[in-house]
């Protein structure tokens, strides 16, 4: 009997044969809760550290002056002024518009603010004297009316170039009608503009334009420089 018990003890050690202790079982049941506690502690520490980092950043930003803080970059929206000064019945105006103005407008029409001014001389009684006579003054007024009524350069510049190509016939009605039709301008509106207030409105626009060209020309010659963003044709 003793020999059998001794053999059983050798085959099955007491630690395996004996029933588990209650204390040990209780500890094993509590082990799954330990990782949860560690996770909670980790999250608390992480949140606390994040709060401190934001606080330090805000304090550092407050110490910076206005010039040191990053400023948003604003896109440039202002257009470059481009101005041509011409005489409607001058052959140089035709060449100027065709060879200088048109190539620029084809490449940079959305980046420039193009305007036309006319060359002449203010006369007595609020009048204007034009180099190529009264017909040129009327041609200038018609082209100014086109710019006034249709400020898009595609419209008024196209109309002006059409007129200038046949400058010898300015201001014949047939030429004005054909160019207005070609560039979708209303001939009646142009006529009303040119004859408004018995012609005083058109002459007033021309006189103002002539003064503008005269001022630019004087400034250019005074500085011996033609750096002004425009052309005098």
Image: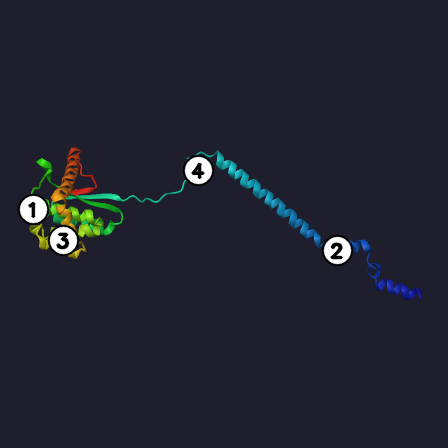
**Element type where label 3 sits in the image:** helix
Labelled pair 1, 4 in contact (Cβ < 8 Å): no
Placement of 11 over or under 157, stated as above or below: below
Q: State which tag comes first along the sequence, 4 or 3.
A: 4
Residue 168 spot, x, y in % from top left: 7, 50
The Cα atoms of the two marked residues, 4 and 2, are separated by 57 Å
User: In the rendered image, is residue 8 in sight?
Assistant: yes
Q: Which of the 4 image quadrants contains residue 45?
A: top right
- Residue for badge 2: 29
- Residue for badge 4: 69
User: In the rendered image, is residue 98 in sight?
Assistant: no
Q: Which mark is residue 135?
A: 1
Q: Which circle, 1 or 4, is nearer the viewer?
A: 1
Residue 223 spot, x, y in % from top left: 18, 33
Q: Residue at left 13%, top 50%?
A: 191
Residue furthest right as drawn: 1
Q: State which tag comes first along the sequence, 1 or 4.
A: 4
Residue 183 spot, x, y in % from top left: 18, 55
- Residue for badge 3: 162
The Cα atoms of the two marked residues, 1 and 4, are separated by 62 Å
């Amino acid at each position: 009997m003793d020999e059998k018990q001794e053999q059983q003890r050798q085959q099955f050690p007491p630690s395996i044969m004996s029933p588990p202790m209650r204390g040990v079982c209780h500890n094993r049941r509590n082990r799954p809760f330990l990782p949860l506690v560690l996770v909670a502690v980790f999250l608390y520490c992480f949140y606390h550290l994040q709060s401190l980092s934001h606080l330090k950043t805000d304090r550092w930003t407050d110490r910076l002056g206005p010039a040191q803080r990053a400023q948003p970059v604003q896109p440039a929206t202002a257009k470059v002024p481009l101005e041509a000064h011409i005489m409607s019945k001058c052959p140089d105006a035709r060449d100027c518009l065709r060879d200088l103005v048109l190539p620029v407008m084809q490449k940079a029409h959305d980046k420039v603010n193009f305007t036309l001014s006319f060359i002449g001389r203010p006369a007595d009684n609020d009048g204007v004297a034009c180099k190529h006579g009264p017909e040129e003054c009327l041609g200038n007024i018609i082209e100014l009316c086109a710019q006034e009524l249709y400020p898009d350069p595609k419209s008024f510049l196209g109309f002006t170039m059409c007129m200038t190509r046949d400058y010898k016939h300015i201001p014949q009605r047939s030429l004005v009608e054909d160019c207005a039709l070609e560039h979708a301008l209303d001939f009646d509106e142009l006529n009303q503009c040119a004859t408004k207030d018995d012609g005083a409105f058109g002459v007033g626009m021309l006189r103002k334009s002539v003064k503008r060209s005269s001022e630019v020309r004087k400034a250019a010659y005074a500085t011996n420089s033609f750096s002004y963003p425009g052309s005098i044709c």
